Amino acid sequence: MTTSASINKLFSIRNQYGKGKVLEKLQLLSNISIKNIKSNKAVQTLYAALLFMQAYPDNKKVHKQAGDKLQILTEYIHEHEDLQYKLYNTGITGTTMCAGFGFEMVKWLRKTHPASVRFNSFENDEIHIQPFVSVVMNKAESEIFQDGNASWKEWLMRVKPEEGILDQLIAIFDSSDIRPEVKDEIWNAIGINIEIDFVTHCRLPQSMTKIFYHRSLIRKEKKNEPLPKPVQVTLTDTAAEQVISCSRMILLSHLREIDPISFTAAKLISCYHLSRGITIVLMGMVPERRHPIDSYMGYMVFKNGLPVAYAGSWILFNSGRIGLNVFPHYRGGETRFIFEQVLQLHARVYNLKRFTVDPYQIGKDNHDGIHSGAFWIYYQAGFRPIEKKQQQMAETEAAKISMSKKYRSSPAVLKTLANSRLELVLQKNATRFDATDMSRAYAGILIKKHRGNRQLSEKGAVKKLAGILKIKNYQDHNMHFVLKSWCVLLLCKEKELVQNSSLKKTLKTLFDLKATGSEESYMATLQKAHDLRKLVEELIKIYAIELRQ
C-alpha cells in the first residue's frame, strides 16, 4: 500500500472502534513514512486524522503513536520550505497564514507572539488609508497631512524610524479615545494584512488534561440518563491566560474571531470538566465591549485537551440564543453529545430555561451550515422551528430520514428550513423573546411613535432616563452606551416607569452592573426583574414589527 493510500485509509477509520480497528490504526501509523509524502493534500489528510485520534483515541498506545507521528509531521513541515509554501494559509502547525484580523487581536498577537507575527500588506492604497489614520491620530499631529504636506506613511517613518509600520499603527489606535467598536471598523477599513507563523499545537496545559479512551463513539442521545455534574476548575491567572491564548490561536488558524474570546480576560473565564474527556471554558467580555441589553458570552470546548468546538451565547433573562461550531478536523466525532453537554452546562451555570438558534447557524447566508447539515444537529438536540411552515417541513423530512438511513435533505430544503429561528423550551415559565425581538419592538416604536425619526426619538432621552433612575455618571462612556440602548424602549412606558420605585431601583442596579460590574451578576439580577420582563413583553406585543422571510 502506498503512503498516500495508507493515509486515506487511516483517515477513513479514524472514528471507527473495536479491537480489529485498533490493530489496523497502529499498523497504518507504523507504515506511514512522513518523508514519502508527496502532496500537500496528503499532509492535510494525515494532519486531520492524527488530530482526531488525539481527541478521540482508542487507547493509550494509539494516543501516543498518533501524537508522536504528529510531532514528526510538524518537524518535517518546519524543515521543508517548499512544503510550507504549498500549505500556506491552511493553519496547520508549522505553516504561515496571511489575513486581516481585528485591532485588539493584532495588538495581542504583537504583544504575546512578536517573533511570529509581522506586517504583510494593505488591501487599500495609501491615499485611501490616509483619512482613516487622520481620524484616529491626535488632531495636532494629523494636521500635517492637510494640503499634501506629508503622506501618513512617510510621516510615521520619520517620527519613529526604528519601529515598524504595524507597531506604529497599533500605538496610534491604542491611544485613541474613539469608542472600541468604531475603532474596530476603522481598523478593518484600512485593511491591514498580517502574517502569523503557527509554531506550536493549540492544546490545554497537561495539568488540566485527563485523557479519556474510547471503545466507541456516542452517536445517539442516552434517554433518561442524566449527564454527570460538571466539576468547576479553579484556574490561576497563568493557566487562564494559557486557555485564552489557546482559544484565540485555534480560531485565528481557521480565519475566525468571536468577540467574547477576543475581548475576554483571565478573571472573566470559568472552566468545567465534564465526562468523556470534555472540558468547557465559558468566557465573558470586559465591560467596554459588552452588549448593552443581553449578555454575549463565549465558550470553547476541549476534548482530551484539544480545542474541538466553539460558539457564543446571547443571554437575556432566562433565555439564551446559542450556536455550535465544530472545527473541521473533529467532525465525525461526538458532536451531538458535545452539544448536549454545552446546553446542560449553560442551563446550569446561567439558570436558563429556553434556548434559541439564529437562522445563520443553520445555513441562512452560510454555506458551511448547509453543507454540514447543521439543522439536524439542532433538531436532534430537541430544537424545533418557530415558524409553522418550517415546523411542517421539518416533520416531513424527519419522517423520511427515519424511514431510510440513506436519505439526506437537499440543499434547497435545508435553505428553506434555515428561514426560521429554532427553539428549545426547557420549562414553561421560560422567557419567550430574545434581543432580536426587542430590536423589532424598537423599530416599531420608531415607526409608530416617532415617524421613523431616530434623532427625534433619542433627543434628550439619555439624560431624561438617567434623571428618572437617578444615575449621576450617565456621561461615562460605558454607562452612556447602556442608557442610549435602553432609553427609547423604556421611555415608551415612561409613566409606568416613573410610578414604579422598585423597577427604577432594579434598572439602576442593572445598568451599574452592565457598565462596570459583573456580567454574571447582571444576568442573575435580570432574571429576578419580573416587572422589567413584563414591561418588555408588552412592548414586543404592541410594537414588534414582522421580519420578512
Image: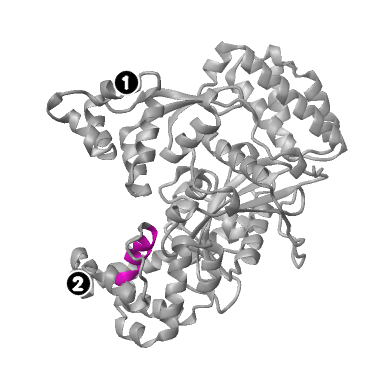
Q: Is residue 280 toward the left or the right of residue 417 in the image?
A: right
The residue located at (36%, 38%) in the rendering is 173
438 displayed left or right of 146: right
Q: Give the range drawn in magenta.
A: 478-488
Residue 209 in percent (x, y) is at: 76, 43
Label 2, secondary structure: give it. helix
Please provide percent x and percent y for residue 69.
75, 23
Q: Left or right: where does residue 481 sit relative to residue 354?
A: left
- Residue situated in front as seen by the camera: 540 or 205: 205
- Frontmost residue, 444 versus 401: 444
- Whether 479 is among the magenta residues is yes
* Residue 17 horizontal/vertical position (percent): 80, 40
Q: To which residue does mark 1 refer?
A: 157
Which of the two marks, 2 or 1, is nearer to us in this view?
Answer: 1
Residue sitting at 45 percent across and 43 percent down? 367
Q: What residue type is labelled 1?
A: Met
Observer-nearest of 432 and 471: 471
Mark 2 to mark 1 CA distance (whole Å): 51 Å
Applied colour scheme: one colour
- Give the label on residue 427, or none: none
Q: Residue at x 74, y 40 (%)?
A: 56
How crowded is the residue under tag 1: few (<14 C-alpha within 10 Å), some, or many (20+)?
some
Q: Quadrant of residue 133?
A: top left
Relative to residue 270, is residue 493 depicted above or below?
below
Rendered image: mark on residue 450: 2
